[in-house]
Image: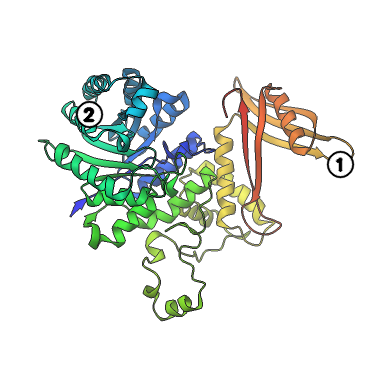
Amino acid sequence: MRKVKFFDTTLRDGEQTPGVHFSINHKIEIARQLSRLGIDIIEAGFPASSKGDFKAVSQIAHEIKGSVIAGLSRATRNDIDTAYDAVKKADGARLHIFIATSDIHMRHKLKLTRNEVLEITRDMLSYARTLTDDIQFSPEDATRSDPDFLIKVLKTAVECGASTINIPDTVGYTVPAEFAALIDRINKEVILQCDREIDLSVHCHNDLGLASANTLIAVRNGASQVETTINGLGERAGNAAFEEIVMALDVRADSFGVTHGINLSEITRTSRLVSSLSAIAVQPNKAIVGANAFLHESGIHQHGMLCDKSTYEIINPEKIGLKVSGLVLGKLSGRHAFAQRISELGYALDDEAINATFEIFKENADRKSEVADDDIRAIVNEYLDTKSGKYKLCDFQIQSGGRVKSMAMITLSYTENGEQIETSEAAVGEGPIDAAFNAINRIVGANGKIQLENYEIKAVTEGTDALGEVRVKIRENDTT
């Protein structure tokens, strides 16, 4: 059986989910888990988009072993050079170059003719070929492109060195039968006509709810690589969800006739890690990784499950790493048990981080009879955020009443020229949140420059002693 490669773009397209931002530390944690999961290619980011993304991609390329690391690039020399500089230290480095091929995009976005797009494709892939042998080419908005022109562009890309051809359904426009015909034609007219091995890949968006269906029909029609994101994160309605694709190929191997190199037991851990770090909750009825995916409420279903689980379960939940741990963590738990649970939750922390988070865990355990996994995730995420940020909250005091404005006293610490500095400021506001933000603005010297757009707080577990998770959206000029 032929093997299907998994190309994960959680760190690039997944981060384009509205409201999602991964710090460098978060990206590295996710990349480590993706490698443990067995992902073949990790698209670590878009290096030319920002200095922060370049740094994150470079660090991932340096640290992560066992997976190819890809960097996204527009079809320009500067983008290609920047992407290559970011990924070149990886065990396996890939350049992922794209240019739009639909008339809509070429006319309105690129302001280019078909011949100009062909020429850019030829020049930029030929240049990229001087840097690396591993080049992936994507004709953006492929499913709304003229098929004849699309084939011409793809043949040009292959002639100039592309080793993977990726077909993006950029706006989630296509439907399975139509996509099957397109993939079949590309396979026959481009891939099979080449005198070297070329991977045919697909990247499907979920605007019509068809991303998984389109991806699977593409595999059946010759695709050898699939682009997915954990939990289906991505632009607008998201991308094809990794967990849906891999389990469909695994459970219905009789139908698809392909193999993969994924460690299925890491699926649940990966899903929960990404959900926690992205602050995007997985809907309860989400296939494979939703909270209700293996729950049975109907009496008829329960009776069937008691007789034989195969009556209503097509997947053994333990196969995807979904199991109840026999280890209960509380105030009497030791550092070893805590470190083991941290590892089980998908984090890879050094001794310093384990010691620091264990102290916070013990403080919480003194107040709670049992510390849940979500509590531990909150503790670790808070630690990672503190490590990646410039400022640390030392103390705060809030005064709020019905007839007077609220007042906040905030103390932050930060390092400047090697010296640890603590600064306190007081401010008033229309409410406690407004007052707190006004005080923070004074400390960081951003009075009037930064606007609070949204503030959400929720408990991460049940009970009055639950830890809280806060999500803040702020705007500075045009940056949110």
For residue 239, side relative to residue 432 (left or right): left
Total marks drawn?
2
Q: Residue at x 42, y 37 (%)?
A: 13
Say whether residue 361 is visible: yes
Report if the CB atoms under discs 1 and 2 are less than 8 Å apart.
Answer: no
* Residue 128 spot, x, y in % from top left: 25, 23
The dot on residue 153 is 2
Amino acid at circle 1: Gly
Residue at the right extreme, as displayed: 403
Which tag, 1 or 2, sits closer to the chain's start? 2
Of badges 1 and 2, the one in the foreground is 2
For residue 122, side relative to residue 291 (left or right): left
Along the viewing direction, whichever of 154 and 425 lies nearer the viewer: 154
> Is 96 located above or below residue 281 in the figure?
above
Along the viewing direction, whichever of 253 and 322 lies nearer the viewer: 253
* Residue 280 spot, x, y in % from top left: 53, 46
Q: Residue at x 15, y 42 (%)?
A: 188
SS at badge 2: helix
Q: Which residue is mark 1?
A: 401
Quarter-of-image position of residue 257: bottom left
